Structures are given as structure tokens and as C-alpha cells.
Image: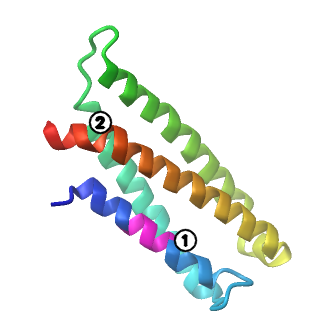
Amino acid sequence: MKSSLDLEHDELRRLMDEFRPVMPGGPEADSTRMAQLRIRFSDLFRKHMSHEHTAFRALRSDRPGCPVDAAVQEHADRTRELFLGYSAHVNRWSLRQIEQDQEGYRESVFALQRACRAQMAWEERKLHPLVAKN
């Protein structure tokens, strides 16, 4: 059975997949739908980060040299970088900017989605199994 963290990852991936075709230049371009999906993704992403922080913080032992603590710290560092990139993306790409540089926006979205997917895959390999045992 999948954990709530895994289910949230599945939903984040689904929203990313749903977002691709509705972006400008996509086969189903729809600025209203795109805005709705941006908001839904943002809300879930923030909630998910909070859930992860709580779950992964509970794994810490605070023992020097503990590999679990190192993985939890690595997660915090990686998540901070991802969140800063995501925040910069959202601030950079207003609806007006998107219309002015559709291809640049698409490239930025795809890069951010790749980073997000890579982060989730890393978490699922390194930390989710530890949460399941805890």
C-alpha cells in the first residue's frame, strides 16, 4: 500500500503531466486551465513540503555520523534549492511574460518539472522506505 507521501508524489506528477498540453504552444493551450493547474500544483507542493518536513524530521537521531541524519539533511538542502528555483520561476513568469515568451516559458517549465521529478525519485529511493519502517 502506498504511503500518503507516495500518493502526494503521484498527484504532483499527474498535475505536471496535465499542465504540459495546456501551456501556450501546447496541443490544448488554455490559459484559464493553466492558471488553475498552477494554483493547484502550488498548493499541493507547499502542503507536501510540510508533510515531508514533519515525516523526515521524525527520522533524525541527532547522532554524529548517522547516515539517516545525513540523508535528511541532504533532503533539506535539495528541497531548499528546488523551492528557490520554483519560487523564482513563479515570480519570473507572470501571464504577461508567458504570452511574450511562450517558448522560454515552456523550456523553464520542462526544466523545473525534470528537477521536481528527480527530487521525488530521490526521496522515494532514500527516505520513503525509512518512513515506512518508522
Give whichever of 51, 120 is nearer the camera.
120
Up-down: is 98 above or below 32?
Answer: above
Up-down: is 133 above or below 74?
Answer: below
Place residue 4 in its image quadrant. bottom left
Residue tagged by mark 1?
Answer: 38
Residue tagged by mark 2?
Answer: 56
Q: Earlier in the sequence, mark 1 or mark 2?
A: 1
User: Any magenta on residue 36?
Assistant: no
Q: Report helix, strand or loop for mark 2.
A: helix
What's the distance in space between the residues labelled 1 and 2, CA to CA?
26 Å
Q: Which residues are the magenta region?
A: 11-16
Answer left or right for 57 relative to 110.
left
Q: Report helix, strand or loop for mark 1.
A: helix
- Look at 47% across and 67% down and name the residue there: 41
Circle nearer the viewer, 1 or 2: 2
Q: Position of residue 53 (x, y in %)?
A: 34, 40
Q: Position of residue 90 (x, y in %)?
A: 64, 60
Place residue 64 in its image quadrant. top left
Residue type at mark 1 is: Arg
